[in-house]
Amino acid sequence: MKTTFAVILSALTASISAVPLEARQAQQVTFALSNDQSGAYAGVTFPADGTDKSIKALYGGTSVGASGSVLASSAQLTAFPQSIHCTLWNNGVALGTFTADHTYVDLDGNPAVAIPVNLDGGIINCSA
């Protein structure tokens, strides 16, 4: 009986550890956009799986997309794993890279003013 239990336990352990990394659930990240002129703010949680995600699809139905366009003056990681790495792109131009140590970007490039940027052509890509 002890031998059978040991064999079953070994087989079970081997099958659990053999699950491919792709089949394991991706860690989650929460990324927020703010429009400091209108006061709109929206945080969206999505998998940090290394795929491009459309800003318009993620935020179009939120307060920062209420005008029909996604308008934001800043972006911030608000919940994330320590190994996070995200890049925000808009129309092919990198607006910012986000990590556990660098969680905030002023999108208009001037911290003295709050000019919303149209992010309808934006994508976010995060991996952990």
Image (cartoon, grey):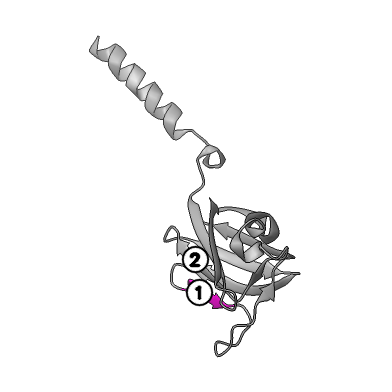
Q: Residue at x 43, y 57 (%)?
A: 81
Type of amino acid at the residue the image marks with label 2:
Leu
Q: Is residue 72 above or below residue 43?
A: below
Residue where numbered disc 1 is placed: 104
Percent coordinates x, y for residue 27 in the rendering: 48, 50
Q: Residue at x 73, y 63 (%)?
A: 68
> How many numbered marks does the figure carry?
2
Q: Mark 2 or mark 1: name the one nearer the start of the chain.
A: 2
Q: Which span of residues is magenta-colored?
A: 102-106
Type of amino acid at the residue the image marks with label 1:
Tyr
Percent coordinates x, y for residue 35 in the rendering: 59, 73
Q: Are marks 2 and 1 in contact (CB under 8 Å)?
A: yes
Give the spatial CA distance, label 2 vs label 1.
7 Å
* Residue 64 image-quadrant placement: bottom right
Q: Residue at x 56, y 41 (%)?
A: 22
Q: Nearer the viewer, residue 95 or 120?
A: 120
Percent coordinates x, y for residue 75 in the rendering: 56, 71
Task: Spot the residue most to the left.
Answer: 2
* Circle on res. 38: none
Q: Main secondary structure of the magenta part?
A: strand
Q: Residues within 10 Å of mark 1 (few under 14, many from 20)?
A: some
Left or right for 38, reference 118: left
Residue where numbered disc 2 is placed: 77
